[in-house]
Image (cartoon, rainbow, N blue to C red):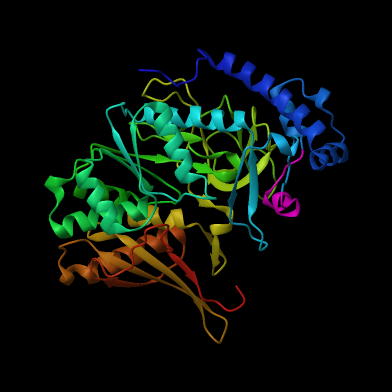
Amino acid sequence: METFLPSYTSLEELREIQLKGLQWSVQHAYHGSEVYRQKFDKAGIAPADIKDLDDLRKLPLSSSQDLAEGYPFPFLSVPIDEVVRLHTSSGTTGKRKVLCYTKKDIEDWTHFFARCFEVGGLSTEDRIQICVGYGLWTAGIGFQLACEKFGAMAVPVGPGNLEMQMEFLMDFESTVICCTASMGLLLAEEVERKGLRDRVSLKKMIYGSERSSDAMRQRIKSILGLSDMYDIPGMTELYGPGTGMECSMHEGMHYWADYYILEIIDPETLLPVPNGEIGEMVVSTLQKEAVPLIRYRTRDISYIIKEPCPCGLLIPRHGRLLGRTDDMFIIRGVNIFPSQIDSVLREQDGIGSEYQVYLDRSKEGKDSITLRIESASGSDASADYETIESLRHMFKNKLFVTPQIEMVEYGTLPRSERKTQRVFDRRSGE
């Protein structure tokens, strides 16, 4: 079977690849994009100044605001007739973020996306049911092209339509499913409800697009009898999904460092943080032609894992995505990320995978936080009082807030075919 994994044999060789790619990318962006040229000139740096990887920090940061301001073709660094496709993602200013692709960009994306299937231990015998969005979104077509490049059978169902998903799982005997974690939970619970476990051939799930809790993943894996599940990162600005992959060790995400450089910075000071410390992910592409990214702030929160992976792959890793800088909320002067709530909940027995967070403010201006949490399937409601008290104690000690907690029956909270909203900020003016 063809291999798609990188060919470098040492980290020193990888650094050489990265330096060469960075020098090319900076020169390409400077001469191809008026916006980048102005940014570099203002910062007093020219392409010839990039002599080693440490010089990366001299380059100015870029952000989604730059993409919004450059609509409809932001950061375009090639003639428009070299663009063969565009994709978009949602924007924060009323306009979508538009990303263009050359033929080589598509080929590169397809190649390194195929690595994901290899890292996940898939084979050309697998039948991969793709349950993510097509059209202007990068997900569906990205999964499909990579699947076909890898040599497995693609079953491009698209998102939603639970009944059709179930029908195809059984009729086509799909062995792998690609979806959001929320969609995975919906499918798993439908399989359980209809007693179809013996008629489903699924072995693995590749999921992404949203943060998911350990309890949620374990619930999906248990119901469907999966041998493994793999988290996959990705963002439209950085080609799309498939920019890395969790391996069977589940100790972080391998990311394709021969295609982009990853930095972790403090989102407040904008300075790099030491390896292992949590911060905002910043990416710089090394081969992207149409829309190169130079020190692009992703808003995603993670950390670099310096130690070699037990799986043996010589591919750098970052931690699982912990959320986004714009996900953070402040309650009674305490900064909280939803991932911190996940970490507390996973320590408590007797609860399910689904929860909701409500933030309210009284007329007197006092903030309050309420958690609605599902009990575990088949749990005894008489134990809810002890569970609530235990959770309140843990939240107070670990996050320095004491929420009101409401336990609800398993299956009460809504499920979603796309991403599940968990935090509802109902405070006026926020």
In the displayed structure image, the side of residue 364 where residue 374 appears, left or right: left
Which one is in front, 159 or 6? 159
Q: Where does residue 188 sit, x and y in percent of width and height?
A: 24, 53
The image quadrant that residue 398 belongs to is bottom left
215 relative to 145, above or below: below
Q: Position of residue 302 (x, y in %)?
A: 52, 43
Specify start and end residues of the magenta stretch as a single range. 60-72
Image spot of residue 217 (x, y percent): 31, 48
Tell me if I can see residue 369 in this picture. yes
| Residue displayed at 23% across by 72% down | 385
Question: Which is more toward the observer, 123 or 327?
Answer: 123
Image coordinates for residue 423, horizontal then vertical, percent: 46, 66
Residue that lies at the very extreme toward the bottom in this rendered image: 363
Q: Is residue 56 above or below residue 188?
A: above
Quadrant of the drawing holding the C terminus:
bottom right
Q: How many marks?
A: 0
The N terminus sits in image quarter:
top left
On the rendered structure, is 55 left or right of 143? right
